[in-house]
Every structure is written in C-alpha cells, then in structure tokens.
Image (cartoon, coloured by chain):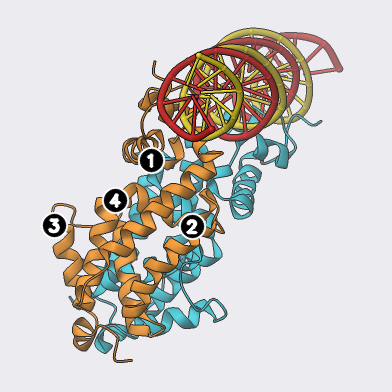
Chain colours: A cyan, B orange, C yellow, D red
Amino acid sequence: MAYHHGDLRRALLEATAEAIDEHGVAALSMRDLARRAGVSHAAPTHHFGDKAGLLTAFATEGYEQLAAALVTDSFLEMGVAYVRFALSRRAQFEVMFRPDLYRADDPELVAARTRSGAALYTGAGERSKGQAAWSIAHGFATLWISGAFPGRDQDPMVVARSLFAQLGQDATNDTGAAG
Amino acid sequence: MAYHHGDLRRALLEATAEAIDEHGVAALSMRDLARRAGVSHAAPTHHFGDKAGLLTAFATEGYEQLAAALVTDSFLEMGVAYVRFALSRRAQFEVMFRPDLYRADDPELVAARTRSGAALYTGAGERSKGQAAWSIAHGFATLWISGAFPGRDQDPMVVARSLFAQLGQDATNDTGAAG
DNA sequence: CCGCCATCTTGTCAATGACAAGTTAGAGTC
DNA sequence: GACTCTAACTTGTCATTGACAAGATGGCGG
C-alpha cells in the first residue's frame, strides 16, 4: 500500500459527504472513512486531529460553498439558491448547523461562516422581511430533508418558490441594498 | 442498591433531555443515562431495547407534547406555540426532526406524529400560506437554537412574531378551517 | 410460603476515538 | 547518488461505548 495517497485530506472530506448521505451524521465513523479511502485507521487523525477537527473542516468547506452559491442579484433567487444548496449538499448543510459537532470558534470556520453570512445579511440584513425569507428557506429545507414536509411527489424547488411568494410581493424583487 | 427503581423508564427519558441539553445529541450515551439514574449500565437496554429504541420513545413523547402545545384557535398563535415548544423542549425538538436517530416506522411514534401533524395541517394544510408559516416557525427555531440567527440579545418570541407578520396579513387571523 | 417473572446486575465482545511510537518515501542538500 | 530530514502514513494500545448473554433479586399471585 502506497504511503503517499496523493490528496488524502480531500479524499476524506469527500468520503465524509458520501458516508453522511448514506447513513447520517450519527453513524459517521473515522475508521469507516479510512476504509473508504483505503488507508489505515489512524490516517484521518493525522490530517484533522480528531473527529471534531474533521467536521470543522467539513463545515468550513460547506460555508465556503454556500457563500459562492448565494451570489445572485435577486432576493428571491438567493432564497432559491439557499434551498438548492441545502438539498444538493445535504451532508454539509446538516453539519454546518450542528455546532455541537465541531469547533465553532475555529478561525478558518469563522471566516468562512462570516463570508456566507455577509452574502446572506446583504439580502436579509436585520430587517424582518429578509429574516423571514431566510427562515422560510432554512425551515423548508430542513423539513424537506427530514421528510416531515408534505407533498413529497412535487419538485421541492417549485414548492420553495411558492413559499417565498407568500411574503409581501415587494420583497421578492429587492436586493436589500436600498435599506 | 434497590432492584426496583420505581419508574426507571420515566427517569431515563428525563435524563435523556438533560444530557442532550448539556452536551448535544451527538454525545448522548446510554451508559451515561444509566449513571444519571443510578442504575447499572445495561438497565436502559431492558426498557428500550437499544439506543434507537430510547430515542424512538423520546421522539414519541416529543410529538405528543407538540400536539398538545399546538392546541390554539389562532393561526398566528399556533406558529408562536411551535417556536415556544422548540425553544423550551430543545432536546425533544432536535431528536424529533432527525429520523436517522430513531425508528421512524415505529407504530406509537407514527401515531403521535400523526396527531401533531393533524394539528399542524389543520392550520397549514396543503396551502402555501400555512406551509410558509410552518417553514418560518421551524426555520427560525432551528436557526436560533444553532446560534446562527442574529440579534441574540432580543427576546426570541418577539422576533418570531415579527417574522410571522411578514406573511400576508389575512393569514395571521385564519385558522385554515374555512379552506 | 413458594414459585414466577419482570426488573435490574454482572460479565463480555466488537467497534470506535484518541493517542503513542514506529515506518516509509520523497524532497532537499552536498 | 548516498544522506538526512520530515511529512505522511502504519501498527499497536487503551478507555469508552452499544449490544447482548446469563445470572441475581424481590414483589406478587396462588
């Protein structure tokens, strides 16, 4: 077995998403990740220190991806993008909002979270309408993922748009920059 | 040490809420619950079969409590009650919406979930406005709990009301029974 | 007063996270 | 082109955990 994997760190982060998608975060195991990557059981520790370190890196990556996904000029589309991110990167989304799983004060994570927060607050700000939109996006995404939301035969993105439409109409075409 | 605890099942469920409130679901340990209740490490297994069984019972209890909490005549107050439940019974709320932690097909759990769902759908139904309100309530609650929501010096219940107010005004005084 | 059996205990096992100590390979140096 | 240096990875170990098996206890029906 080769001693130098190439990019084990990357492979482990990808294996993490796979494993969570398959069995949920609760069943996530460092040793299973090692097996998936074809390395010894202690190899992941070398790169991440411990399990919390792995999930810190995983959540950081998630915040960076979210920040990138939220770049759009329309207030409505930002909400749609938020839901799309949550549903397409379920594993990241799930870990990101469970700070008990990682080190929430890690500098790199805080920086990434701040970046995605900046995008979000530009549209949502401290204003109730933006916060309501964020809550709808986040609530719908988590309810849909957990299976609690009705109408599972429908396209979730279509449903999401119908929910945003329930907010005052002026909000759907407002980037928030005017506030 | 007494062989008959009295109501160990009850004590364990209460210890579960305590333990989750203190260290999160991720760190929940059957043996720790046993220690908290002052019984041997295998006692919990006798009552719940396994960890998933314990959390199934815990989530079932949560759904029953939620169903009771949602009994109100006002659409708006139901949303407020939902948020209040989530914040006051954090542990139950967290477990309820993580079906990977328990047996989602358990008959008693399904019954309890259906009961709380009935209350919810009476107000929310299949209609977008009700679903938007549910999403706001659920999203706000989870974001507040995770610490991601801004304005943490404010009273969360006041913030929640300001969010519901962003929905069309006619929705805030509609039980949905007319649909 | 005696057996029954739900309740709880003790004992054990495989899996896991964390850590310590050893091994390898490839990069830099001369 | 051998030599060292060190990051990357391995092997080995330990305490903890969930799950299960088997035994102990004590209240309750007969």
**Between A124 and B43, the one nearer to me in the picture:** B43
Question: In the rendered structure, which disc, 4 or 3, sits on the residue that comes first in sequence?
Answer: 4
Q: Mark 4 lies on which chain?
A: B
What is the CA distance from the residue labelled 4 to the residue labelled 1? Answer: 13 Å
Instruction: Kindly identify the amino acid type of the residue bearing the numbered disc 2.
Output: Glu
Chain ID at mark 2: B
Identify the residue under disc 3: B155
For image coordinates 20% across by 77% down, the residue present is B73
State the separation of the CA atoms marked 2 and 3: 35 Å
- Residues flagged by tags 3 and 1 on a common chain: yes
Front residue of A166 and C11: C11
**Residue A73 higher or lower than A32, as above or below:** below
| Residue density around tag 2, few if under 14, some if 14–19, many if 20 or more, within 10 Å | some
Asked if the residues shown at circle 3 and circle 1 are in contact, with their CB atoms under 8 angstroms apart, the answer is no
**Disc 2 and disc 3 in contact, CB within 8 angstroms:** no
Given residues B175 and A18, the one toward you in this image is B175
Please tell me which of labels 3 and 1 falls first in the chain. Answer: 1
Horizontal side of B111 relative to B167 (left or right) equals right
Q: Residues within 10 Å of mark 3 (few under 14, many from 20)?
A: few
In the structure shown, which secondary structural element does the residue marked by tag 1 occupy?
helix
Q: Is mark 2 on a helix, strand or loop?
A: helix
For the residues labelled 2 and 4, the Cα–Cα distance comes to 20 Å
Asked whether the residues under marks 1 and 2 belong to the same chain, the reply is: yes
Q: Is residue B106 visible?
A: yes
The residue tagged 1 is B13
Q: Are marks 2 and 4 on the same chain?
A: yes
Q: How many labels does the image show?
A: 4
Q: Position of residue A66 (x, y in %)?
A: 45, 61
Amino acid on which disc 3 is placed: Asp
Residue at the spot 18% in from the left edge and 84% down from the top edge: B173
Chain to which mark 1 belongs: B
Question: At which x and y percent is residue B7?
Answer: 37, 34
